[in-house]
Amino acid sequence: MTGYRYMFDRGADRGDLIDSHIEEISRVLEYGDVTGEDFEWKLLSAPSQPNNDVFYTAGRICCEDPTDGVKLNYDSLMLEPCRSLGGGVRVKLSVQQLLEDGTGFAVFPGQIVGVEASNPSGRLLLVKRIFLPPKQRVPDSSVQRILRLYSTPAEPEGRPVNIIIAAGPFTLSSNLLYEPLRELVKVVQKEGPDVVILMGPFVDKGHPGVGPTPNGVRAGNAEQILRNILKPIFEEILAARDGLKLVLIPSTRSRESEWVAYPQPPIGSGLDDADQRRRRAQFGLDHFGPNGAANSRVYLLPNPVQLAVNEVVVTLSNADTLMHIGSEECWRNQRPANADAASLGTGPGVAGAGSAAGSQTTTMDRMSRLFSHVLTQRHLYPLSPPSLGAPDAPFCLDFARAYGGTKPAALRAHPDVLVVPSGLRQSAKTVDGCVCLNPGQLVRGANDAAGTFARLCVHPLEMALLRRELEDARAAARGVANPRKRKARDAAGGGGGAGGMEVDG
């Protein structure tokens, strides 16, 4: 991903991109996905078509009142179908039956959902159930590849892969000494991880020591800070262990990136190769070599990015998606069997939404639910329009890049690890088979409170078991009976003939 021009998209083009995204997810809701899992097909109908019977439809959740500052609530829910299904005509939703039944649900603007409902008047959908897209395909790796990655003559059983992940800001607001980052370097030197992932901002645009001061004197710029302060720190990290890989990801709050809208190209990007070389030289990053070079140990990656650490798929998105969705979400707790309606509240809590029914995961805690929204929507920033009530608002979202072209913000597969730094409390959750991490920030808030980072340890599978599986597969391909299986059959009696039993080795 290289640099590009942005803020050139037109309203009509943006509408086309959103409609295309609604149609894509609606098809998944109707026909399922190639996941190998059972899926109940649902024939979708236009939501504005009068129908006394219960039917299925799908679309994007919208707020009836688009006035700035008006939050989504039970009375302002609307559903916008794609043009091919319902002409893009928005229809009001009534969730009264869900509230009366105590069925939990959680929705937010821009979320694409399926709805089981009736519409006697053609103007109001009486919702019976809300359902979400099924789980995406889970990437897999061959046995040969896993053995090649982990098993070596020196370590035939493999060893764990250790990863440290930290998100900025990396310095206190009172100076540019980057003391918290230097403390992190000490941890890296002590533990010697295999991969260190640093997610910006490296030079925070809100830092008082960067940019013009009140008297008009420029205190410092991103190029000087990166070249004179951060580059030596990066070299200390690389020296902590032979073969250590350093990953740098920008932020929309970074002064070192000219691209302030999400998604972003890597740090030091340019509109052409010459411009990119010039920018990297200004930052002092040309010394590390280009990504993918044989001697490259520093990877300048875009925001967001999906990468593989050995066989583990890691998705990283440096936007506070969790806080943004949480500030705009409308939800309802699932009523416990022994609770009355008066005991339930609304707002941030433990409601959620599941892939089969709205109540499937309504017992999730809040952080798990927010991570679940990202996974089920198959997009790393599914909120539309972007949040205006979050602390870091306004958030700049480049619709042409987020929903068009190669769609760098779209999830291509169900990740093994999802990393989304947030101003919310640091957390580690397992959601639908995915390890979801909020590493927090290395420096928290305007008061420069002590922050957090994440350690991730990936243990290898049992190498001996994988070797046996590989031997069995090769024997089966040659048409030769596996000696362990033959021995088991003989021990069971009959050698696998009539009355015998076959036991897998």
Image (spheres, rainbow, N blue to C red):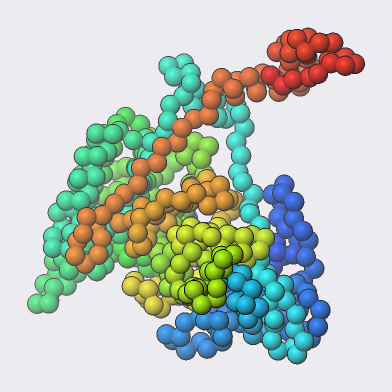
Q: Position of residue 296 (x, y in %)?
A: 38, 38
Is residue 469 found left or right of 478 in the rendered image?
A: left
Which residue appears at 54% of the width and 23% of the height? Answer: 463
Instruction: State which quadrant residue 97 falls in.
Output: bottom right
Q: Position of residue 359 (x, y in %)?
A: 61, 64
Which residue appears at 55% of the width and 73% of the height? Answer: 340
Residue 288 in view in this figure: yes
Quarter holding the C terminus is: top right
Which residue is nearer to you in this view: 112 or 101?
A: 101
Is residue 250 found left or right of 89 in the rendered image?
A: left
Which residue appears at 70% of the width and 62% of the height? Answer: 28
Q: Position of residue 465 (x, y in %)?
A: 59, 22
Residue 197 drawn above or below residue 404: above
Q: Residue furthest left?
A: 215
Instruction: State which quadrant residue 133 falls in.
Output: bottom right
Residue 428 drawn above or below residue 101: above
